[in-house]
Amino acid sequence: EVQLVESGGGLVKPGGSLRLSCAASGITVSNVWMTWVRQAPGKGLEWVGRIKSRTDGGTTDYAAPVKGRFTVSRDDSKNMLYLQMNSLKTEDTAVYYCTTVAGKFGNWGQGTLVTVSS
Amino acid sequence: QSVLTQPPSVSGAPGQRVTISCTGSTSSIGAGYDVHWYQQLPGTAPKLLIYANNNRPSGVPARFSGSKSGTSASLAISGLQAEDEADYYCQSYDSSLSGYVFGTGTKVTVL
């Protein structure tokens, strides 16, 4: 059974940085494509960024609102996925989910809340 | 940046059939990309409900079905049950954005 567990959320001031982690079990993160999806309070789902599997080059892609500020990475030795978030804005306040992706977002974590506020 | 449009809400009595539309464009659904659907129960993470337009993952009841035509897709729930009360999102890929896109979301209410 695939399990994804996010951590690292919290309160941060505008302009600050935060790194989210996603611990995976039941899968090998280097062998699958993985993404981050966020959901602002009371709002819909928004794709944030993706990292391809190692065999597919391990490249990353990002949604326009976060490009240049957020970085998706992984640590294959720890089987972990990360989201480094810099230059945070109030509009980045959301629950952040890590997911596996193969066209569809098949497996989801429970999410971690990031609040950007002064 | 939702580029897939859904009705904000639909409702129906127990046992009825409801449908949720998902309208995209020629660079998303109309370009041939698959449509997937997710169910989000209150306070929980989304769950894959329908994948590749009309396929149900193991464990999803047969009363959920999907279809796709042109630049749109639909989710149908037959024999509506109280436990179906949730938010539903469609999702696809958009080549003009080079990224995944979600629908605006639809809240289903069981009367």
Image (cartoon, rainbow, N blue to C red):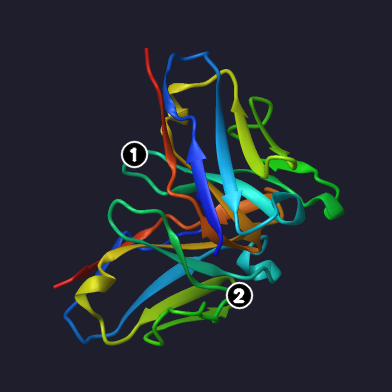
Picture quadrant of residue B60:
bottom left
Q: Where is residue A19 drawn, in percent x and y?
A: 57, 27
Q: Where is residue A60 drawn, in percent x and y?
A: 75, 41
Q: Nearer the viewer, residue B86 or B44?
A: B44
Badge 1 element: loop
Q: Nearer the viewer, residue A80 or A50?
A: A80
Badge 2 element: loop
Q: Is residue A118 above or below residue B8?
A: above
Q: Are marks 1 and 2 in contact (CB under 8 Å)?
A: no
Picture quadrant of residue A112:
top left
Q: Does the image show residue A1?
A: yes
Label 2 amino acid? Ala
Circle 2 sits on which residue? B52
Q: Where is residue A114 drawn, in percent x and y?
A: 43, 30
Q: Where is residue B25 drawn, in percent x and y?
A: 60, 62
Q: How many marks?
A: 2
Circle 1 sits on which residue? A41
